[in-house]
């Protein structure tokens, strides 16, 4: 797909209309309400200006579009094309943090316009909170060319914080010049940020099975108010095993053998090969080490490996509980997202991830879809409850 090609919607006929989409509520109002409730769950209600967070502004014209009109474009952010994703990040002994991811150009018909709208939104955030967009402009020719191959152009995320401006993250597409050039584009981008020496080991480890099975999915940059800004590279691992995910994570200095694989088994409820939606790994680089990654995250798309959101929630709770994290918050967050029963669908919990760092404590993040347009029915053929083998994996991953 190039920037001149219209973006077409593709919603499965097996999906059902979301309960929240039966009225003319605008998209911006719907997701803003979810965000405010999530902030309340996380204890952020005392933030100055919390109600002034620019989520509707980031969505542009799409914010005023009623849910009954359907998604403005085939956004890659969520399965039902909702252009917003929420997440809660947990660390032991601390309150969870809230993040929101947005595709600012979601109302555009083509990716070139999508990119322009995304950059305009990013510049507006930079003016509002006083940070520079120079890092994005440094690699604009690599990721935002005139003719962009799909499925995305630019996404923005905000990490919400107490008593200081949000941390801004930008996600762009390494396949913008075509999938066959994604390695070349990523290598050049890393080089421009001073991490050129990191590329050979990253490519050899994260894409060891070849680009058809380990493809580069995202390139991300931290902008603005970060103690240690990161440059991040994401790989999607198709038809992968837990053992192979362990081999990927070993690129992180000091990696404890088996930890990533056990986490994948616990969240996905599988002890074999992950044959559905690919697992995703992310390597982050900072000035602390210009040649080796400072962090690694494994993202498990639990929605494709669980019968319904009740099962996905149970697995996430067990992972949080085993790591001494605030389990009660998760149920309150799910209630803040939707009034529906968790057993009635799957996909409200989209991913569960484990982030490890050479200089920070481990972090588990649970990602939520707004389900603004449709709700996926439970996955047929997937057991409703965990097997003993999966329960064993859950216990092992907490060690």
Image: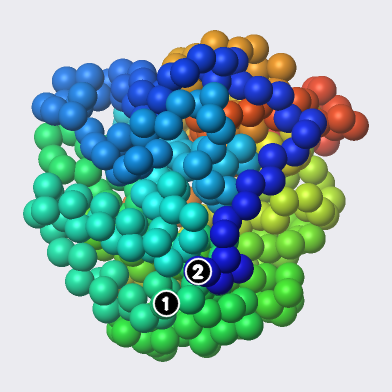
Q: Is residue 361 visible?
A: no
Residue at mark 1 to residue at mark 2: CA–CA distance: 7 Å
Mark 2, Cα crowd under 10 Å, few <14 / some 14-19 / many 20+, is: many
- Residue 90 falls in image quadrant: top left
Mark 1 near mark 2, Cβ–Cβ under 8 Å? yes
In this image, 164 relative to 99: left or right?
left
Q: Is residue 50 depicted above or below 140 in this figure?
A: above
Whether 145 is drawn above or below 102: the answer is below
Q: Is residue 288 left or right of residue 49?
A: right
Residue 352 horizontal/vertical position (percent): 57, 40
Of residues 54 and 159, the one drawn nearer to the viewer in this rendering: 54
Mark found first going from the N terminus, 1 or 2: 2
Residue drawn at point x = 13 percent, y = 58 percent: 131
Q: Quadrant of the N terminus?
A: bottom right
SS at mark 1 in the image: loop
Q: Which residue lies at the image location 70% right of the left edge and 56% below the top edge? A: 278
Residue 351 x/y as whole percent: 58, 41
Left or right: where does residue 390 sit relative to residue 47? right
Question: Which residue appears at 64% of the width and 71% of the height?
Answer: 215
Residue 3 badge: 2
Mark 1, residue position: 146
> Where 38 sits versus 106, above or below?
above
Residue at 57% x, 59% y is 6
Q: Mark 1: few, some, or many residues within 10 Å (few <14, many ≥20)? A: some
Decide which of 306, 293 is in the foreground and name it.
Answer: 306
Q: Which mark is residue 367?
A: none
Q: Nearer the viewer, residue 181 or 342?
A: 181
Secondary structure, mark 2, is loop
Residue 304 is situated, as x and y percent measured from the top left of the image, at: 73, 41
Q: Is residue 149 visible to us here?
A: yes
**Residue 123's image quarter?**
bottom left
Give the position of the C terminus as an image quadrant. Answer: top right
């Amino acid at each position: 797909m190039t920037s001149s090609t219209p973006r077409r919607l593709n919603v499965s006929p097996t999906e059902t209309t979301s309960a929240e989409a039966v009225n003319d509520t605008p998209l911006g109002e719907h997701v803003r309400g979810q965000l405010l409730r999530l902030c309340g769950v996380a204890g952020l209600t005392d933030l100055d200006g919390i109600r002034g967070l620019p989520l509707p502004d980031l969505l542009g014209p799409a914010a005023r579009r009623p849910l009954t009109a359907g998604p403005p474009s085939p956004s890659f952010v969520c399965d039902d094309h909702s252009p917003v994703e929420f997440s809660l990040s947990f660390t032991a002994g601390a309150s969870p943090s809230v993040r929101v991811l947005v595709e600012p150009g979601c109302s555009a018909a083509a990716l070139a316009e999508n990119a322009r709208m995304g950059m305009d939104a990013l510049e507006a955030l930079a003016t509002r909170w006083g940070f520079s967009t120079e890092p994005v402009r440094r690699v604009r020719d690599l990721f935002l060319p005139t003719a962009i191959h799909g499925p995305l152009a630019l996404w923005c995320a905000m990490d919400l914080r107490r008593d200081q401006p949000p941390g801004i993250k930008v996600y762009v597409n390494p396949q913008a010049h075509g999938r066959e050039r994604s390695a070349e584009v990523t290598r050049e981008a890393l080089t421009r940020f001073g991490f050129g020496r990191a590329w050979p080991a990253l490519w050899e480890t994260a894409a060891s099975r070849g680009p058809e099975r380990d493809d580069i999915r995202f390139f991300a940059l931290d902008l603005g108010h970060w103690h240690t800004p990161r440059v991040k590279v994401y790989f999607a691992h198709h038809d992968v095993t837990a053992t192979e995910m362990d081999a990927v994570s070993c690129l992180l200095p000091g990696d404890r053998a088996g930890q990533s694989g056990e986490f994948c088994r616990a969240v996905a409820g599988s002890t074999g090969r992950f044959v559905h939606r690919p697992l995703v790994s992310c390597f982050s680089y900072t000035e602390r080490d210009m040649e080796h990654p400072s962090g690694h995250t494994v993202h498990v798309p639990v929605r494709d490996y669980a019968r319904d959101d009740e099962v996905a929630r149970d697995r996430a709770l067990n992972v949080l509980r085993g790591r001494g994290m605030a389990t009660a918050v998760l149920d309150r967050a799910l209630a803040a997202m939707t009034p529906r029963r968790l057993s009635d669908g799957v996909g409200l919990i989209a991913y569960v991830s484990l982030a490890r760092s050479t200089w920070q404590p481990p972090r588990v993040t649970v990602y939520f879809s707004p389900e603004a347009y449709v709700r996926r029915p439970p996955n047929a053929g997937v057991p409703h409850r965990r097997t003993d083998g999966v329960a064993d994996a859950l216990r092992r991953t907490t060690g």
